[in-house]
Amino acid sequence: MALFQIDRRTPLAPAEAWRRLTDWERHGEGVPLTRIVVRTAPPTGSGTLFVARTGPGRLGFEDPMEVTRWQPPVPGAPGRCRLEKRGRAITGWAEIEVGAAGPGAYVVWREELRVRAVPRALDPLIAVAGRLVFGRAMRMLLRTGPGTGPA
């Protein structure tokens, strides 16, 4: 499996960074050719199911996920969310951690991916691609400035 980690700092408060990073539908805005559909009613919590559909038409694939841990940040303790990937094409997990860092927050995104039918020798390339794709999504979700207020 390809394991990667992305670390970021943001001037956003931990609660706002958490809210943005766990707004599942918006993840599709940061990942090319991807659309997210949440299949369970709000609010998000353990048991929330959603599917990322990536790719054009028949060439695309679905990446179903389930939230298996939901612990929003509180003063003095970071928030942690774990997603289990249960697709036919992609399996693995992702964890998001958000905590206080000075006047803002730190974010750690850890992910372990297995792309079926891809030789394990290519796992380092999958990890690099994962860091690029999810790093871009994180930047988009956490950006601040004019026109980037709450979604």
Image (cartoon, rainbow, N blue to C red):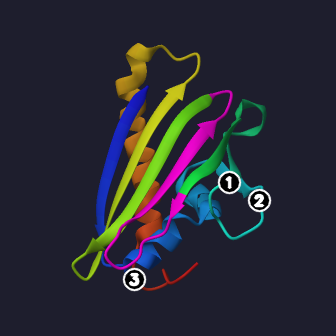
Q: Amino acid at mark 3?
A: Gly
Residues under labels 2 and 1: Cα distance?
A: 8 Å
Tell which of 46 and 118 is nearer to you.
46
Going from the N terminus, do you reach mark 3 or mark 2 first? 2
Q: Earlier in the sequence, mark 1 or mark 3?
A: 1
Q: Quadrant of the N terminus?
A: top left
Determine if the magenta segment contains residue 74. Answer: yes
Mark 2, Cα crowd under 10 Å, few <14 / some 14-19 / many 20+, is few
Q: Residue type at mark 2?
A: Thr
Residue 22 within the segment the image draws in magenta:
no
**Residue under the point 70% across and 52% down:** 49
Evaluate if marks 3 and 2 touch, with contact meaning CB atoms under 8 Å apart. Answer: no
Residue at mark 3: 145
Residue 63 appears in view: yes
Viewer-nearest residue: 33 or 83:
83
Mark 3 burial class by Cα count in 10 Å: few <14, some 14-19, many 20+: few
Mark 2 lies on residue: 40
Q: Earlier in the sequence, mark 2 or mark 1?
A: 2
Mark 2 vs 1: CB contact within 8 A: yes
Query: Residue beneath label 1, please?
Result: 47
The residue range painted magenta reads 70-89
Secondary structure, mark 1, is: loop
